[in-house]
Image (cartoon, rainbow, N blue to C red):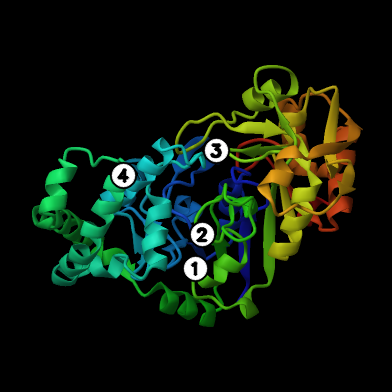
């Protein structure tokens, strides 16, 4: 019963969707274990680009059972729209949604936006993710299974919504299309409105909602090959990330167990996805950050098409950071690495890698816990030679023949990162397409 976890090793946007899609070709199940529709994955298969937000990256394969695990927060309307969009492209993926997954409500989106407008500075996507996870932790939230029972749903909403309306008022927020003061005086009509809307979602989702823990264990017993897919990246993890500039769930490999019900004893591999440079979206310290307006930063942004799948926001870019990556290896227990977007570095005269931080004159290879220390940390770099832009023929050749077909300096870069992290780099991405991948398990 081979079970693999795919986890981002940086701040997300490392190319997990492409790698999961690559692994899904030989998998039976792909399960998302945390996050919501704030985390976009782009998959290019057979020349067609698919921008996924909530659905697992296995949906491109007809044979794969896709699972939205209990660790997710699900916006039912967004889920149904995304599924409709895939079906319009001629895809008909097998989907199962956990009856234990938390539900995002309109009040959650309003609260998320109010926090950002008040200057929280986290840089969320305003999709309601954090407030939905807050209600889950407070044991007040609505779960997907509740959508199938209109009476229970209305009861839960009646207990939750008045309190959240008061919080929205305190944060000077607004609920589009409604008079907040009127709702505070009498929330009953609004509760009825949301109950009706979400019961409708429940009816539409009913054929897909199930006990996914039981489903996954049935697959384990049948010796199915399972891929567990995380969203975002290690340093957006609520515990291990660059707090408070993090998401509200456990993005690391440990979250794969709590977010699906699969025990750690059956996981036999953890794929860490590492972009060949570093990007992040939203606020927070970024030690190796470069200006996107000129030079290397502009090159990485434009050649790497570094714009968010969900929001279209420009990603911040910088050199590869080994201080971050060593911690990512530790907390995730990575058994192998997929290095993505190596081709984007092509054309640069030299390539830098951060090997340590200088914090107030003291060098360290450990990741500081305090945001204040990260904010003043200076990168200590090692420099590598650059290599020419990889043309179409070079990419095809390397994909067929392996790492040895790449320019010497490109090979040295891959090998240096592998040596520094002491984890084998098994996959090397040299283009956005599924086929533009060097599989070192096959070619070396």
Q: Secondary structure at mark 4?
A: helix
Residue at 59%, 28% in the rendered image: 305
Instruction: For label 3, count other residues whose C-alpha is less than 10 Å away and answer few (under 14), some (14-19) or many (20+).
Output: some
Q: Secondary structure at mark 1?
A: loop
Foreground label between 1 and 4: 4
**CA gap, disc 4 and disc 2:** 20 Å
* Residues at discs 4 and 2 in contact (Cβ within 8 Å): no
Residue 15 location, quadrant? top right
Furthest toward the bottom, the residue is: 221
Q: Earlier in the sequence, mark 3 or mark 2?
A: 2
Q: Which residue position holds label 2?
A: 249
Earlier in the chain: of badge 4 and badge 2, it is: 4
- On residue 316, the disc is none
Asked whether, in this view, residue 101 is left or right of residue 27, the answer is left
Q: Which residue is mark 4?
A: 110
Above or below — where is 91 with respect to 286?
below
Report the mark closest to the observer, 4 or 2. Answer: 4
Q: Which residue is found at the position 86% from the left and 26% from the top? A: 350
Q: Which is nearer the eye, 13 or 23? A: 13
Give neighbour class at mark 1: few <14, some 14-19, many 20+ (Cα, 10 Å): many
Q: Earlier in the sequence, mark 1 or mark 4?
A: 4
- Mark 4 or mark 3: which comes first in sequence? 4
| Secondary structure category for the residue under label 3 | loop
**Residue under label 3:** 282
Left or right of 225 in this view: 177:
left
Q: Please state the horizontal and vertical placement of residue 32, each as a whole percent of the image.
A: 49, 60
* Front label number (3 vs 1): 3
Identify the residue under disc 1.
Answer: 259
Give whichever of discs 2 and 1 has the lower sequence position.
Answer: 2
Asked if the residue under mark 1 is in contact with the one under mark 2, i.e. CB atoms within 8 Å, the reply is yes
């Amino acid at each position: 019963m081979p079970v693999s976890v795919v986890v981002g090793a940086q701040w997300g946007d490392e190319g997990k969707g492409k790698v999961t899609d690559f692994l899904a070709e030989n998998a039976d199940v792909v399960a998302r274990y945390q996050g919501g529709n704030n985390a976009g994955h782009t998959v290019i298969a057979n020349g067609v680009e698919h921008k996924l937000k909530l659905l697992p990256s296995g949906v491109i394969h007809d044979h794969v059972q896709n699972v939205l695990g209990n660790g997710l927060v699900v916006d039912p309307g967004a889920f149904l729209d995304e599924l409709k969009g895939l079906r319009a492209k001629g895809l008909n993926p097998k989907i199962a949604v956990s009856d234990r997954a938390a539900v995002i409500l309109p009040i959650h989106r309003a609260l998320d936006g109010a926090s950002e407008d008040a200057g929280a500075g986290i840089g969320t996507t305003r999709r309601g993710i954090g407030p939905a996870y807050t209600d889950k932790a407070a044991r007040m939230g609505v779960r997907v299974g509740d959508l199938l029972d209109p009476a229970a749903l209305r009861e839960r909403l009646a207990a939750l919504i008045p309190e959240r309306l008061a919080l929205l008022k305190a944060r000077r927020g607004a609920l589009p299309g409604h008079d907040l003061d009127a709702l505070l005086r009498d929330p009953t009509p609004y509760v009825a409105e949301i109950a009706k809307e979400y019961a409708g979602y429940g009816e539409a989702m009913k054929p897909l909602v199930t006990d996914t823990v039981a489903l996954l264990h049935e697959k384990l017993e049948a010796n199915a090959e399972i891929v567990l897919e995380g969203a975002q990246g290690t340093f957006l993890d609520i515990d291990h990330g660059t707090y408070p500039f993090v998401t509200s769930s456990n993005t690391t490999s440990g979250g794969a167990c709590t977010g699906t019900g699969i025990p750690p004893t059956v996981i036999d591999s953890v794929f860490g996805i590492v972009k060949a440079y570093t990007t992040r979206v939203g606020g927070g310290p970024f030690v190796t950050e470069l200006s996107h307006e000129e030079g290397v930063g502009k090159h990485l942004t434009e050649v790497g098409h570094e714009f968010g799948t969900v929001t279209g926001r420009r990603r911040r870019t910088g050199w590869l950071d080994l201080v971050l990556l060593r911690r990512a290896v530790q907390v995730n227990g990575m058994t192998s690495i997929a290095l993505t977007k190596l081709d984007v570095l092509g054309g640069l005269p030299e390539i830098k890698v951060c090997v340590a931080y200088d914090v107030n004159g003291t060098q360290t290879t450990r990741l500081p816990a305090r945001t204040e220390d990260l904010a003043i940390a200076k990168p200590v770099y090692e420099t590598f030679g650059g290599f020419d832009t990889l043309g179409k023929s070079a990419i095809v050749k390397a994909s067929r023949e392996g790492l040895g077909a790449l320019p010497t300096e490109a090979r040295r870069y891959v090998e240096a990162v592998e040596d520094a992290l002491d984890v084998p780099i098994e996959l090397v991405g040299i283009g956005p397409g599924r086929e533009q991948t060097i599989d070192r398990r096959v070619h070396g």
